[in-house]
Each structure stands twice: as structure tokens, then as C-alpha cells.
Image: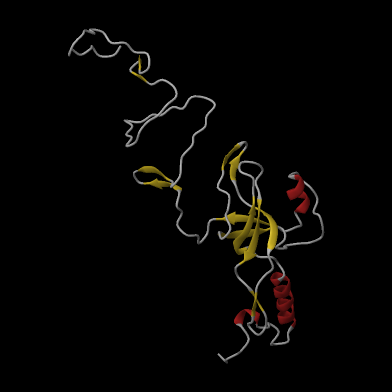
């Protein structure tokens, strides 16, 4: 195969000067104009705790290249909606952070109106397959996390360097063979074991001196 200074992906398909080659070149040109899904890195995040899912600013990681193989970085892509695992009013909230690596998925048409109103809407322009019309899906090629929920062969494992807070409007029910705790336990309420209250139980057989009382009841 003869040597060439032209990158393989940029070589012309019109060498034979035939109708087929001309059509192939035209088709390839149109395909190259389609905005492909690609790896990106998060530059900034706009999010408010548990409110409406936020948006990210991302930078494509695979750079552009000219006919002389010179690389050129893409511009930043702003206001990109990101994925949140949610069904109805229930969600798992793990918002992206600057530096995260993920993927953008390109829409076929200008989805600006649909993103803005969150309702079915006509395309905002005749723009097609543009990187401006994309959504972000995160979690690729990132470093190991400091806190996580992990499924193992032995069961579920929850790890965090901080605190764990559970808030419930109704009762919290735990079902297990037993519970072990290697820490102090503090509660503002009562504790009951086999129907006996820790705060309000009484002892029988009380007597003066060195005697002991009966078990709580």
C-alpha cells in the first residue's frame, strides 16, 4: 500500500472519478456533518439539590482534526440536560461534578422548545444532528468513588466518609437476622425490647442494702 501523508479517515473516495465514487464522497460528506455521540468532560454543573434536574457544560474529549492532522479543540457545549434515574416522584439523585467523564447523545432535530417547556413541541429551528441538541449521560472512565452503594456476592455494601441521614414520614422497618453496632446509640424517643420500655419499665423485688432488683417489666 503506498504511503500517504493524508490521515486514513480523511482520504478522498473520488480517486477513480466514477459516478459511484462521486456519490460515495457526497454521502460521506453528509455523514460527516452528523453530530455523533461522543465522550465529553464536565466543565460546570448547574443544579439545586433535589429540585428540577439541572444542566451541565461539557467539552468534547475527541478533538477535531484538519487535513494536515492538526488537532483543534471543540467549543464548550452549554446547558446540556443530564440523566437522573427517576420514575414519577421517586429518584436516585447523584448529580455530576466538574471533571466527570460521560457521553452526549445527539438529538436528530433542534429540541430547544421541548427542553425549555418539558412538553411536546415543534423543533425550534431547521437545525439537525447538532451537538447543541444533546443530553449528557455520565459515569465513564472516572476515578474510584469515595462513597458508594455496591452490590456484592455477600449482599449490599454502603460506604461513605460522611454521615448517613434517613428521613421518613412513616415508620422505618428493619428485617434482619440480627443487628450489630460498634458505636453509641442515641435516641430522643423510647426503646422497647419484647414489649418492655427502656424509659418506663419497673423493677420488682427492690430491697435495701446490697440486694439486686428483679428483671425489668
Q: Is residue 6 above or below residue 112?
A: below
Q: Nearer the viewer, residue 50 or 120?
A: 50
x%, y% of residue 13? 68, 82
At a point 72% along the width and 70% down the height, the residue shown is 33
Q: Which quadrant holds residue 124?
A: bottom right
At a point 76% along the width and 57% down the height, the residue shown is 110
x%, y% of residue 15? 69, 87
Q: Is residue 16 above or below residue 46?
A: below
Q: Is residue 212 left or right of residue 165?
A: left
Q: Nearer the viewer, residue 122 or 181?
A: 181
x%, y% of residue 132? 72, 61
Q: Nearer the viewer, residue 100 or 68?
A: 100
Q: Nearer the viewer, residue 128 or 165?
A: 165
x%, y% of residue 50? 61, 41
**Outermost bottom residue:** 2
Q: Is residue 136 left or right of residue 193?
A: right
At a point 71% along the width and 78% down the height, the residue shown is 25
Amino acid at each position: 500500500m503506498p504511503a500517504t501523508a493524508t490521515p486514513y479517515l480523511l482520504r478522498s473516495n473520488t480517486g477513480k472519478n466514477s459516478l459511484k465514487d462521486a456519490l460515495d464522497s457526497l454521502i460521506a460528506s453528509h455523514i460527516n456533518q452528523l453530530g455523533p455521540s461522543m465522550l465529553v468532560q464536565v466543565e460546570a454543573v448547574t443544579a439545586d439539590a433535589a429540585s428540577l434536574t439541572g444542566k451541565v457544560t461539557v467539552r468534547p474529549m475527541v478533538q477535531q482534526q484538519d487535513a494536515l492532522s492538526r488537532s483543534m479543540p471543540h467549543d464548550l457545549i452549554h446547558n446540556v440536560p443530564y440523566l437522573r434515574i427517576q420514575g414519577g416522584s421517586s429518584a436516585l439523585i447523584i448529580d455530576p461534578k466538574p471533571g466527570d467523564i460521560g457521553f452526549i447523545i445527539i438529538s436528530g432535530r433542534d429540541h430547544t422548545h421541548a427542553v425549555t417547556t418539558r412538553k411536546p413541541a415543534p423543533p425550534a429551528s431547521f437545525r439537525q444532528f447538532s451537538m447543541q441538541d444533546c443530553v449528557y449521560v455520565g459515569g465513564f472512565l472516572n476515578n474510584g468513588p469515595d462513597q458508594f452503594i455496591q452490590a456484592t456476592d455477600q449482599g449490599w455494601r454502603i460506604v461513605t466518609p460522611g454521615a448517613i441521614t434517613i428521613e421518613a414520614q412513616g415508620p422505618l422497618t428493619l428485617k434482619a437476622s440480627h443487628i450489630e453496632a460498634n458505636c453509641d446509640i442515641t435516641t430522643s424517643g423510647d426503646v422497647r425490647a419484647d414489649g418492655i420500655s427502656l424509659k418506663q419499665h419497673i423493677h420488682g423485688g427492690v430491697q435495701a442494702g446490697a440486694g439486686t432488683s428483679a428483671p425489668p417489666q
